[in-house]
Amino acid sequence: MSQPFKQTFDFEAMFQPLIQIIEKITDCPVVPNAQVASAKKPPFITYYPLTFDDPIFSDATANEGQFETTVSLDVFADSLSQGMQKSGDLRSYLLDPYVRQWLRTNARITIQSATAPHSRSVTALPFHAVHHHGFDLTIQYWRHYTSPIDVINAVEGFFDTEKEDE
């Protein structure tokens, strides 16, 4: 194989506009869940994709179509009220028609649903006391990948419906 395998989809680029709007809404830094220990101090938001590349229409192809991702969004805060407030505000704004339209237009992401915010549990954090609240956000996006393999769509003359002369 002369051509090396390439990235079929850029998840980081897809998440970037969502992260930007979350930072604007909450006025907090947003970090991947794996980097929670590197966050300086609360309040901050983490995200973690729970499922991704789930076909919407049960399409058999993983190359092109509309797909869904469920992302866990978590607010870490110093106080119970701050955590609840930021989590509730974030969910409300992400479901707001203005924000949904902005994401659809600028990021080609459609917000499908958001679960109710819940208190969440986490252990072994580098903070003394932290309140942790979050919810799961389901988004849809278009994924397109073209295989380097030629695909035969039709064979000329193979499906002629005219009867042959007898």
Image (cartoon, rainbow, N blue to C red):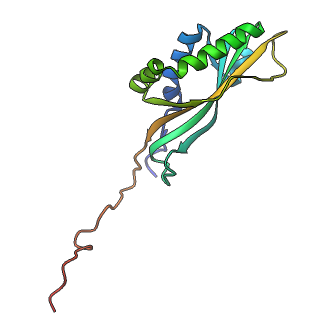
The location of residue 69, given as percent across then percent down, is 57, 36
* Tally of numbered tags: 0
The quadrant holding residue 107 is: top left
Residue drawn at 50 percent across, 20 percent down: 96
| Residue 123 visible somewhere in the drawing | yes
Quarter assignment of residue 126? top right
Identified at 40% across, 22% down, the residue is 106
The one nearer the camera, 87 or 28, is: 87
Task: Write the residue at 44% across / 18% down.
Answer: 98
Q: Is residue 8 above or below residue 85?
A: below
- On the image, the x and y values in percent for residue 15 come to 53, 26
Asked whether residue 40 is in view, the answer is no
Q: Position of residue 8 (x, y in %)?
A: 48, 40
Query: Where is residue 21 shown, x and y percent of the image?
Result: 51, 16
Quadrant location, the C terminus: bottom left
Answer left or right for 25 relative to 33. Answer: left
- In this view, the residue farthest toward the bottom is 166
Asked which quadrant contains residue 35, the reply is top right
Please report the residue visible at 62 percent of the width from the left and 30 percent of the height from the top: 71
Position of 64 relative to 99 (above/below): below
